Amino acid sequence: MDRNLRALAWSLAASALLALGCSLVKPDSDAPLSSSIASASGEETLAELLNPRRLAMKAKVASMSSEEQQRAAELLDPERIALKVMIATRPIDEPSLRDAIWAVADEHALDADLRLRLEANGLRVGVVDGSMPPEVEELLSPEAPQGERIDPLVVAVPNGHATPIMVGPDEPVDRKTLFLSLANGAVGRDYENARAAIRVSASRDGDAIGLRVVPEIHHGFSQLRYAPADNLGPFEPEQFVMRDGQQEESFRDLAASLTIAPGQVLVLGCWPDRPGSLGHFHYTKLEPKSDRLLQSVVFLWATPTGPTEIPWVEPVSPPSNLRRVDPSELGVGESQ
């Protein structure tokens, strides 16, 4: 008997909670929201029918002028920059990377003072305008033999934001000593569990893209720490979040800022005869299971893109057995 009473009590409680949930989801017909809903386009989705505020916002946007809608779209869904990164790695004495690419890359796109500072740290930055040398085209070709093909990394970042790209050795180096030439003079620094990275920020500049590349060293053991949140919306205050990661040292006085036009490629590499330099650590590594030294060159393309379309990435077709479901089939929007 007691068991039946407890079952009845649980049933009544569940019914009360269900009724309360329905009252929270169902909009009040007497609220001012009803007039906004009536002015909507009539193509409400399931998410909008379950979220009255979203439906009201849709009605408000529909009442805006085309210019106001454009400004709202730019604020709520900022333009993105698509970056394609390919890292070619070959033996350090192979001329396809050591000589061919730097024979056509324009390193004078940077001012002379910055070029000298980069060279003192073993770093090279240039811009290729037009076609690559044939031997480099062969390295980057998607038709390269299996095992030699370079898979590109494609990432879309909001306009004006940055993303880190890991370079250098595949695994952290237990202990690394680097000799740096910085604004305060030449210094030597020791790092534990060191990894090399570049932080690339991209922003639209008319038909061109402004890129800023900052070399970084990630080092130490992973630990929880506070760090600024990335990719916040334009109306959100600055936030700090807990992250589990290494310490990050950025060399901002070695930052390279360039503007690349459509068809141009940013090239990043090193002077391979500068062991112990920042560039040597970023763009060389030992061949796995060997002591042969390899050299890397980073090729970076950039182009503006929409919120969902990303160039260089083939769209994935949905399964053929999927079909569109009308909200009425789910009983949503029916009069009670």
Image: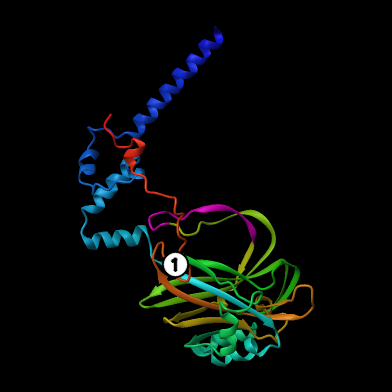
Q: Which residue is mark 1?
A: 310
Q: Amino acid at mark 1?
A: Ile
Q: Is residue 81 visible?
A: yes
Q: Nearer the viewer, residue 57 or 249?
A: 57
Q: x, y percentage for residue 130?
A: 47, 88
Q: Say if the magenta span includes residue 244.
A: yes
The quarter of the picture where the N terminus appears is top right
Crowd band around label 1 with a 10 angstrom C-alpha radius: few (<14), some (14–19), many (20+): some
Q: Nearer the viewer, residue 80 or 271?
A: 80
Segment tinted magenta in the rendering: 233-246
Q: How many marks?
A: 1
Q: Is residue 185 visible?
A: no
Dividing the picture into quadrants, the one containing residue 295 is bottom right
Q: x, y percentage for residue 322?
A: 43, 50
Residue at image location 44% in from the left, 82% down from the top: 263
Element type at mark 1: loop
Q: x, y percentage for residue 37?
A: 24, 42
Q: Say if the magenta span includes residue 216.
A: no
The quarter of the picture where the C terminus appears is top left
Image height of 70 relative to 10, above or below? below
Q: What kind of colouring is applied to the model shown?
A: rainbow
Q: Nearer the viewer, residue 134 or 92?
A: 134
As drawn, the residue found furthest toward the bottom would be 103
Residue at image location 20% in from the left, 41% down from the top: 35
Residue at image location 49% in from the left, 71% down from the top: 83
Q: x, y percentage for residue 331?
A: 34, 35
As drawn, the residue found furthest toward the top would be 1
Q: Is residue 73 left or right of residue 263?
A: left
Residue at image location 42% in from the left, 81% down from the top: 262
